[in-house]
Amino acid sequence: MRVSLSWLRELVPVTQSVEELTAAFDSLGLVVEGVEHVGGANLTGIITAEVVAIRPHPNADKIRLVDVRTVTDGEVLPQIACGAWNFNVGDRIPLATLGTTMPNGMKIEARKLRGEMSNGMLCSARELELSDDHDGIWILPSDTPLGLPIVEALGLKPDVVFDLSVEANRPDAMSMRGVARDLAAKLGLPAKDPAADLYIKGLYDTPNRSVDTVTAGDLCDRLTTTIIEGVRIVDSPQWVQDRLVMAGMRPISNLVDASNYVMFELGIPSHAFDLDKLAGECIGVRWAVDGEQIVTLDGQTRTLSVGSAGAVGIDGATPNEHLRDGVVVDGNDVPVAIAGVMGGHETEVTSATTRLLLEIAHWSPMAIARSSKRLNLRSEASARFERNTDEQASSPAAIRFIEICRETCPDLRVANFDSFYSAGVPAARVVRVRTERTNLLLGTNLDDATVASLIAPIGFNSTLVSPGQLDVTIPSWRTDCELEVNVIEEVGRHFGYDNIKRVVPLSPTVGRLTQTQKDRRLVRSILVGQGLDEVWTPTMIGDVELTDAGVGTDRTVRLSNPLVIEEAVMRPGLLVGALRVLRHNSNHRNPAIRMFELGHVFGPPRPRQIVPYEREYLSVALAGDGDDALSARRVFNSIVSALGVVPSAVLIEPDDSIAGMHPTRSARIVGAGTGFPIGAFGEIDPDVLTKWGIDRRVGWLTFDLGNLCNLPRRGPHLEAFSKYPSSDVDFAFVTRNVVAAGALIGALREAAGDLCETVSLFDVYRGKGVVDGSRSLAVRLRLVASDRTLTDADQLGVRERCIAAAAVLGAALR
C-alpha cells in the first residue's frame, strides 16, 4: 500500500518528520518497506541560473569552464567545470549550489578538476530524477525566472510516499482511511473520515426498482447498484490524477479514476458498466456455468469453471464446488464481469458513455482468491476482496464516487439507488475481553479503562460488563477480528510493543527432538558413515524427464501456473532428481558417486481429500565401482538394523514391473503380513541410464521413511550374550522363483524359535539339477541357547521344524 504524505495530512494533522512517521508505522505493524521522495522533495539547493560565458578547459579537451548568474544583470558566480556540450551562452539551466545533496546522495562541494576549480554542478534531468534523459544539461524555457528553486520554477509539488507492507489480517489498512485512522490513534491525533456525513440529495429518494438479483448468497451477501445519468468521459481533475500516480495507478479517465480513487481512499472497489450496453439495465450475481466464457477488459477470453480440485493442478480430482468462479450477469443472464476480479469488454465504459451502472458488492474472500489465482488475474480490487472489505461502506463509497465525478460532470444525475443484503443485515459482532487475560498475554499491567481507551480511537467500542470484563463491539471494517485474542492484539499494537518490558519466558518443559527427527538424523548419520554424500534436487520436474526415467506422467500433481513451463510437475518420486545428479557428475568426469536424498514426494489426493498426497522419502543411488543391487540391499539392511526394525517385519518381494528399475534385478519392500508398501531396491533400468547418458550400473534404493519407521521395532532394552557355544545349521531349499527369499527366511526364523540367533542367505543357484522356474536357496541358521550347550536333539528338532515350515511355502530340501 503506497501512502502519500500530502494525502495523509488531509486526513490526519501530522507534523512529525518522515523518520518519526516511519517509526510509528513500524510500531503499528504497517512496516515501511521504502520511502520515496517525489515531486522535487529532494531537490533542495538546486536553483535556476543563466549561462553567461563558456571557455575551454586549459588541461582537458572534453571539459568546459562555465560562468553563470542567478540574478538578471547580477554578479557572475565562480566558474563551474562541465563535461556536457549541448548548451550555449544565454541558456537557462538547473544549478546545484555548493552544499547541495543530490537525489543520489552525492554532496556538491568545491573541488579541482584537472587543475581548475569547480564551484557547483550543472544538472541533467536524470541527475534530478525528473526524467531518464541523460543526453546533456537540462535546458529550461528561456522565460524561466532566475534564482528560483527548481521545484518552484517547474511547478512541482514535493511529496513523500511510504510503501507499507500490509499483512493479510489487516483489510482496513488497504485504504487511506484505514491507515489514517490507525496512525491518528497511535499519535493521539484526530482523524478525518472522508466518507463521514456524505450525502447526495435525491440519492436515497430515488425509486428502488429491485430488479437486480443475487442467486448465490454464499458468493455475494450485499449488492449495491447506482444508475447515474448525464456523465461524460474527460480527463480527471489534476488532484485526482496526482494522487493516483502516487498510489501507483495510471490515470485513465474521470469515471475510471473516480472508481480507483474511492478504492484507495475508502478501501471499497467498484465497477462501472455502460448502462446502454447492459441488457435489461440491471445486473445479477450467480456462480458460473462450467465452460462459460467471457472476454475481459484486457481483451482476453476467459473460460470459467464450476470448480474442481483439478483447477489448482491436481489430476484426477473430483469436482469441488468451493472452487467455483463467480460472475456478474446482465438481464439476459449473460456474464458481464468475473466477480471481484475483472469486468467484461462488452459493457466497458467508453468515450460514448452517457449513462452507467455502478456496482459495489461484498464478495466472499475465498471465492475471489481462488478465481484470481486460477485465472492468473491479480488486481488492486481482487487484493482487497481477498482480505475482505467493509460490507457497511457500500453506500458511502457510491456517494464518494458521485461526489468526485460531479467535478467533471456538472449534469450528473442519480436515477436509481438500490442496496440490499441477500441474507439480511448482519448483526454487530461483540467479543468478551478479559483484562486479566490481556495482561497475561501481553506482559502488561493495564486496567479496564486503559484497555478500552487504547482501542476506542480505532472504532472498537467497549462496555464494562463487570470488573475485569469488557464487551467489545467490533467495527464493520475489521472483519479479521473474531476472537478475544484478536482484540488483545489491537490493544498491544496501540499500547506499543516497545513499551512492554522484555522478559525471558519460563517453561516447565525442555525442548527436545521428536522421534521422527531422531530417526531422520540417525539415518543421515548411518548413510554418511558409509561414505555417501547427501544431495538436494528440485521439487519441480518435467514431463519429458519423467518419461525418460521410465516413470510416466499418470497420476501426477501439476501446477496451473508454473514458473518454468518445462517444470510443471511436482515430483512423484526421487528418481528423476538422482538421474539429474548422476548425469551432471558423469558429464564432469566424476561418474563414481554414491549419494542419498531425503525429500518430499507428491501424488493425487487420497479419498475425501482435496490437497495433494505428500510423503517423505529416502533415496540412495550407488554408482561406485562394483555397486549393484546387492550394494543397495546392504545399505537397506544397515538402515533397518540402525533403526531397530524387527527383521521379520520386513518382506522383500521380487517384482519385474517397478517403474524405472531393472526388470530382473529389483524387488519391492513391504510390511510382512500386511503387504503395506514401503519402497523398493535393486538397480536402475539400463535403458533409462542410456537415455540419461550414464554408462555404468547404478544400485538404487528408495522407501517411505515414515512407513519404515512405523514397523515394529525392538525395545530399548539390551539382551545378554550367551556364554555357551553356538552351532550353525545349513539348508539348501529348492523353491519356485515366485517365492520370495525373505518369506523363506522369515518362516525359518519363526520355526527355529528362541534358539535362533541369526538367519542369513549365502547362496542362490540356478542350473543343472534345478528345474526351470525354480532356484536353490542356501540358508545358514546360527543357533545358541542362553542357559546350556545345545545337544544334537536340540539341533535335530530345529531342523525338522524348519523343513516343515519351508514345505508350507512349497520349498523342498535339496
Image (cartoon, rainbow, N blue to C red):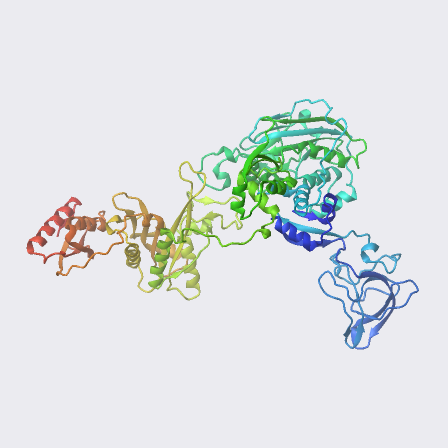
Residue 772 at x, y percent in the picture: 19, 50
Q: Residue 452 sits in which quadrant?
A: top right
Q: In the rendered view, would you say 528 is above or below 115?
A: above
Residue 72 at x, y percent in the picture: 91, 62
Residue 240 at x, y percent in the picture: 75, 43
For image coordinates 30% across by 63% down, the residue present is 626
Q: In the rendered view, would you say 81 is above or below 464?
A: below
For image coordinates 14% across by 53% down, the residue present is 755
Q: In the rendered view, would you say 317 is above or below 23?
A: above
In the depicted view, which residue is nearer to us: 220 or 535? 220
Residue extending farthest right = 73
Residue 142 seen in the figure: yes
Q: Residue 769 sits in which quadrant?
A: bottom left
Residue extending farthest front = 467
In the depicted view, which residue is nearer to us: 221 or 674? 221
In the depicted view, which residue is nearer to us: 273 or 292? 273
Q: Residue 332 sits in which quadrant?
A: top right
In the depicted view, which residue is nearer to us: 352 or 321? 321
Residue 585 at x, y percent in the picture: 42, 63
Residue 609 shown left or right of residue 415 in the figure: left
Residue 770 seen in the figure: no
Q: How many marks?
A: 0
